[in-house]
Image (cartoon, helix red, strand yellow):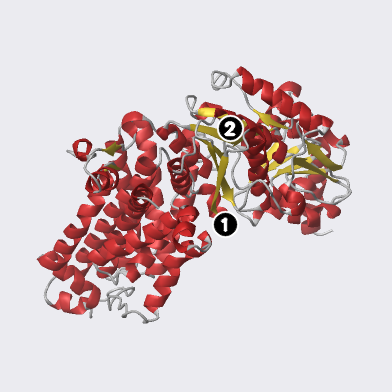
Amino acid sequence: MTLTTKLFSAAAGIALSAGAALAEPAIIYDLGGKFDKSFNESAFNGASRWAEETGESFAEVELQSEAQREQALRRFAEQGLNPIVTTGFSFASVLEQVAPDYPDTTFMIVDSVVDQPNVRSVVFDEHTGSYLVGVMAAMASESHTVGFVGGMDIPLIRKFACGYAQGVKATDPEAEVLANMVGTTPAAWADPVRGSELAQAQISQGADVIFAAAGASGIGVLQTVADEGVMGIGVDSNQNYLHPDNMLTSMVKRVDNSVYDAFSAGESLEPGVVTMGISDEGVGAAIDEYNEGRVTDEMRTALDEARAGIEDGSIEVHDYASDETCDAISF
Amino acid sequence: MDLATILQVLDTTVRLATPLLFACLAGLFSERAGIVDIGLEGKMLAAAFLSAAIAAVTGSVWIGLSAGIVGALSMSAIHGLASITFRGNQLISGVAINFLAQGLTVVIAQSWFNQGGRTPALAGGARFHSITLPGAEALREVPVLGPIYYELISGHSILVYVALLCVPLSWWVLQRTRFGLRLRAVGENPAAVDTAGVSVERLRYAAVMICGVLTGFAGAYLATGLQAGFVRDMTAGRGYIALAALIFAKWRPWAALWATLLFGFLQALSLRPDVLEGVLRIDVSSQLLDALPYILTVVILAGFVGRAIPPRAGGEPYVKER
């Protein structure tokens, strides 16, 4: 046995023993970063809640570039970490290739569906959550004009817009919904200046409630909303605290719950497609100490009715992603 | 379409054109002295971050602005060192500055504020607020001219007026002063300037530093004037649009004003699809409007509408004869 092979086998031995000891869960954050005040941060909160309650630890990494996606996945899988959670639809194509190579590891992807026997796909009913905030927006609006500012023009964001418009129209058929997208490239997630100007344009067209589903561009939208003294609606995480005087609500997506559940299940995490919606509080309209003064009793009643209607099927919210059409709004 | 809508679109135009104008004039000084600067984007980003970060910490937007200018100046110093003193490739140095700023701003922001590469939201004295020009309130009721003065000319942040003042100032410096003559000469024929006994290096460093100050204003305006804080990559390609505007303006200050206003106007229009549809009666896609600045620049570069002749010694390091 040469020295090199000795070294290699020793290294392999260490790697194996480390793998056996480390059956802990792992999470990979998407390019937005784990403190994006929104999607990834929600995932991080779920993971840390699990760590606090169980006293155990988890592995995590923040991607810095597109090229690291596959690398990070493979490294975690080879370390024997299980389950491995990825946040964001951008992981779908990579996971499709990586998952078959590690049949003993369970992966989870949020916001997209990957059809592999060892992948759990968690998707959210964003359209119904958006419907709820649409109902609130229509009731809060005095000008009968509400706005929507989306980030990048992709089907997922149109799904938000379509659900929102349906909620508005169902509550106030006369209301007008203005919808704009920040852009068509990934830069649209991080252009708060353009977000601000879009909000300004919608306000000058009469909008007095604006729903921002635009990542970091949404920070610009909500800033303008606060500066102009109208009302804003946040997205993904509860963003009500950003501008306590001007937030109507936030359309929360409980990514944290999905991560918490996955970590709690540990290695016995079930693969398959999981849809989180209104009934399991996967999506909803956030009401907390910052906005409760602005949420009237009528709004609460209307919200409860809408929630019940969606659950028992008497209200049908059209999902833009199902057939890429939307009657309530034109893009 | 009524006057109010037109004024709103023009108002947006002015706001969106201001960072472009600062950056375009910055590039103008640099390129007129023969230093191609593709790093405008990175310098703006560095300035945007530092101005917002320091304004958030000190609570004073003026200290923030100074910090932003210092940040852009240090980026300029790197560019100058690489491309003037060490005669490196100016394009590569510029690209490196863009990458450096992109990464560094987020890393530092994360370690300082722990908010995912953002700075805390600015409020009160940590932001540039819009100022109302004297007489705007009184003249508001005057038909046509009143609203124009009140909505369009008054009510911007002070940096907008600084940007507009920079245009005649740049023209005067470049065309009417000895420094300006030498600066232009160094971009056309540095050997002649050297023969006259004037230091080429010093002139080029001066130009690069002026570029730093102006991009500092541009970045600070984005983060503390238009917005209330820094967000990663918030320049969103404005440095490149400014470069396109510079070519469109054929490296002249007054033309730079019109070019950036035109590009700002196109951006403003793409935000208001309803206005366009109302006027033209056809549906113009906003993507087309976003692409128009680049298309126009290519048309100009191809020589269809007059020719754009860059400074002759642009992009070449000056090697003194031995």
Tally the numbered discs: 2
Q: Nearer the viewer, mark 1 or mark 2?
A: 2
Q: Residue at x 83, y 30 (%)?
A: A312
Q: Chain of mark 1?
A: A
Does residue B125 appear to the left or right of A296 in the view shown? left
Does residue A203 appear to the left or right of A149 in the view shown? left
Residue A135 visible (yes or no) = yes
Does residue A226 appear to the left or right of A101 in the view shown? left
Q: Residue at x 32, y 64 (%)?
A: B259
**SS for dot 1:** loop
**Rendering coords of residue A108 (x, y %):** 78, 43
The answer to which of marks 1 and 2 sits earlier in the sequence is 2
Relative to A109, residue B280 above or below? below
**SS for dot 2:** helix
Q: Residue at x 46, y 35 (%)?
A: A225
Q: Residues within 10 Å of mark 1 (few under 14, many from 20)?
A: some
* On-image quarter of the C terminus of chain B: bottom left
Relative to the observer, which residue lies in front, A115 or A135?
A: A135
Relative to A254, residue A187 above or below? below
Q: Which mark is residue A137?
A: 2
Mark-to-mark CA distance, 1 and 2 = 26 Å
Q: Amino acid at mark 1?
A: Thr
